[in-house]
Image: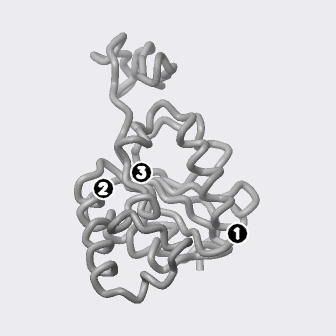
Amino acid sequence: MTVFKADENKIMFHDSITLAGKEYRDITNNTVVSPVRAYIQCSWFSPEEIDFMEKGLEALAQNPTVSLKYSHHPLSHQYNDIDVNEHPEVMGDREWQQNTYQMDMHAMYGMEMGIGLFMPSKPDVGQTYEQGVLYALHKPNILIIPDDEKDIPLNLMVGCGNTRIITLSEARDFDFHDVMFKPYDGKVF
């Protein structure tokens, strides 16, 4: 198992790794590993979604394996820096629609991975579209769900189409470099 510790927002790997039953010293031992740049999907259409988004972003801000500065968060990266929560009328503007969509698509291509703040109780078709795009681009996508929603069944495509699904309480300490596929063990429909 690779263990990391934060050192001025950089990752220092200190342990060896076991591969095929034999222990090896990882070349990254005592070297700095950059945090990942992620496309951070989430919904912000209700007070509950905004609360979960803020909690998720706070957990990611405390995680040294994720760079919030160099990640793409769609609500924070909208065409002409317009906040749609403050100016919902812009959503009817075709120029804003096309440019915001293109910015998000280019970000999905450019980021190393996806991180989704996903609420099973309030599935968002836009977010599931982004998950599908990331899957088609062969990018790992880790979904973070609320701790109290892990018993809510997910759509089969969401439950089985993502690299891994973790809970919010795991997000702060999860190593986002460790993106090996792990099957979802929850219920699907």
Task: Point out residue 172 in the picture as x, y percentages from the top left corner.
Answer: 59, 38
Residue shown at 31% from the left, 69% from the top: 133
Mark 1–mark 2 distance (CA, rounded to whole Å) = 30 Å
Which comes sooner in the sequence, label 1 or label 3? 1
Q: Secondary structure at mark 1?
A: helix
Q: Secondary structure at mark 3?
A: loop
Instruction: Answer above or below: position of 93 versus 4.
Output: below
Which comes sooner in the sequence, label 3 or label 2? 2
The colour scheme used here is one colour
**Labelled disc at residue 141:** none
Task: Point out residue 22 in the picture as x, y percentages from the top left corner.
Answer: 36, 19
Q: Nearer the viewer, residue 111 or 21?
A: 111
Q: Secondary structure at mark 2?
A: loop
Q: Is residue 4 left or right of residue 189?
A: left
Residue 179 in which image quadrant: top left
Camera-near label (3 vs 2) is 2
Residue shown at 71% from the left, 67% from the top: 48
Residue shown at 55% from the left, 72% from the top: 85
Mark 1–mark 3 distance (CA, rounded to whole Å) = 32 Å
Q: Amino acid at mark 2?
A: Lys
Contact between marks 3 and 2 (CB within 8 A): the answer is no
Question: Are there few (<14), some (14-19), or many (20+) residues within 10 Å of tag 1?
Answer: few
Q: Amino acid at mark 3?
A: Phe
Label 1 sits on residue: 47
**Labelled disc at residue 139:** 2
Quadrant for the C terminus, please: bottom right
Residue 30 in view of the camera: yes
Q: Amino acid at mark 1?
A: Pro
Instruction: Answer above or below: position of 128 versus 182.
Output: below
Question: Are there few (<14), some (14-19), or many (20+) residues within 10 Å of tag 3?
Answer: some
